[in-house]
Image: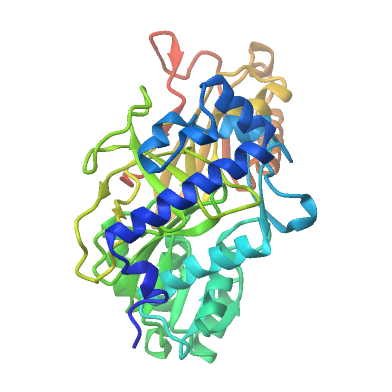
Amino acid sequence: MNKYYQPEAECASREQIRAWQDERLVAQVKHVYENVEYYRNLMKEKGVEPGDIKGIDDLPLLPFLTKDDLRECYPYGLLATPLSDCVRIQSTSGTTGKRVVAFYTQADIDLWEDCCARAIVAAGGTKEDVVQVSYGYGLFTGGPGLNGGSHKVGCLTLPLSSGNTERQIQFMTDLGATILCCTPSYAAYLGETIEEKGLKDKLKLKAGIFGAEAWTEEMRRDIENKLGIKAFDIYGLTETSGPGVSFECMEQGGMHINEDHFIPEIINPKTGEVLPYGEKGELVFTSITKKAFPLLRYRTKDICVLNPEPCACGRTLIRMSKPMGRSDDMLIVKGVNVFPSQIETVLLNKGYPANYQIIVSREGYSDVLEVNVEMTPEMFSDSLSRVSVKEKELVEALKAMLGIYAKVRLVAPKTITRSEGKAVRIIDKRNLY
């Protein structure tokens, strides 16, 4: 059985990886400078030109990109190739309803699928396997990415998308799925349902590739026990391509970053200073092979640690820890990005004061989102039935904005606790990190 999909890249010497990164970074900076006016202006503001970048040691000279830049440039402002060269978009939700749209050439998709194929082979996948892709398809990157990676490996691919658990289990058992790809919370739910139905002995699963949301080691062990598999983590962002930026190997000791495509940095989130390996900080990525939508020094807001030590699996690619938290106020709930500002937008549009509290908890392995909202004094005098109608209206409006269900509770004016005059906006009870 092959341990690697592309051993020449996954097991390259550190000198070779460095040489690729130097060469590709220089070419990418030139490409972006010449083709993206927005980024060219950012570089000019910082007093840097493409000729100043001679390799990865010069990365700190370049400006950062953030989600704010992506929103400001929506939809075409960061496109670095002619639109006629692009064959697809993928998208994620933005903070105030404005989405992040990422563009792909066919070559970009091929490289992304290679990265996902590496993850599948690292989890023990071969062309003999049956891969059930139960991530969402459509604009979400999870389904298309793992689908393409599965094809590259030569596996029989079951493109089920998410939901419809009865059908998921039927295909899983009837077609003998051996590798499951979905969010960890959905994997846990499938495991519980299969246990309840007494179907565990009908499974042929050996591995699962789970990402798009944070999960603990305890949750990993529980999924492994319930489904009788080895569970692997995968990481990615729509902004950089999608899942497959990094992936776990059989050692399960951190996720190998595909450094021939992405240069990682860890920075102090407050100062922007680059930190040495082993120190905890905000993860920053530079795409060095993507052509349509290449982001240089993109701040992910994920807090983690980089580990350069050799891995027992033989891969020389640096490893990143599971994200340990965020440097912004974004929550990831059921695999969906949720920002307090999105909720605030809905409340203000509906005539509510911006006094609210977001509570996220876990029931079993499923996220539960609850929003407590203060009423105005006029609303507070309404009848209980009228308040109930208003709660239902807000549930619908939040679902339209966030794409997921949130329980809404309208509370009396001035009852949400303030500390130093400011409401505590988020209470995350999930203990994920």
Up/down of 426 relative to 157, above or below:
above
Q: Residue furthest right?
A: 84
Numbered-mark total? 0
Q: Give the image quarter of residue 109.
A: bottom right
- Quarter-wise, where is residue 11 in the image? bottom left
What residue sits 40% from the left and 72% below the top?
208
Q: Where the N terminus falls, by quadrant?
A: bottom left
Q: Nearest the camera: 234 or 42?
A: 42
Q: Which quadrant is home to the C terminus? A: top left
| In this rendering, position of residue 61 left or right of residue 352 | left
Q: Residue furthest top?
A: 421
Residue under the point 69% across and 36% down: 98
| Picture coordinates of residue 242, whole percent (x, y) | 54, 56
Position of 33 with respect to 204 (left or right) is right
Q: Nearer the viewer, residue 207 or 219?
A: 207
Q: Judge whether residue 182 can be spotted in this image.
A: yes
**Residue 379 located left or right of residue 423:** right
Judging depth in this view, the residue of 33 and 238 nearest the camera is 33
Can the viewer see residue 95?
no
> Residue sitting at 47 percent across and 38 percent down?
297
Name the quadrant containing residue 120: bottom left
Q: Is residue 150 above or below residue 405?
A: below
User: From the viewer's perspective, is residue 202 above or below residue 418?
Assistant: below
Image location (x, y in percent) of residue 180: 46, 75
| Residue 341 placement (x, y as % from top left) | 58, 28
- Position of residue 53 relative to residue 130, above or below, is above
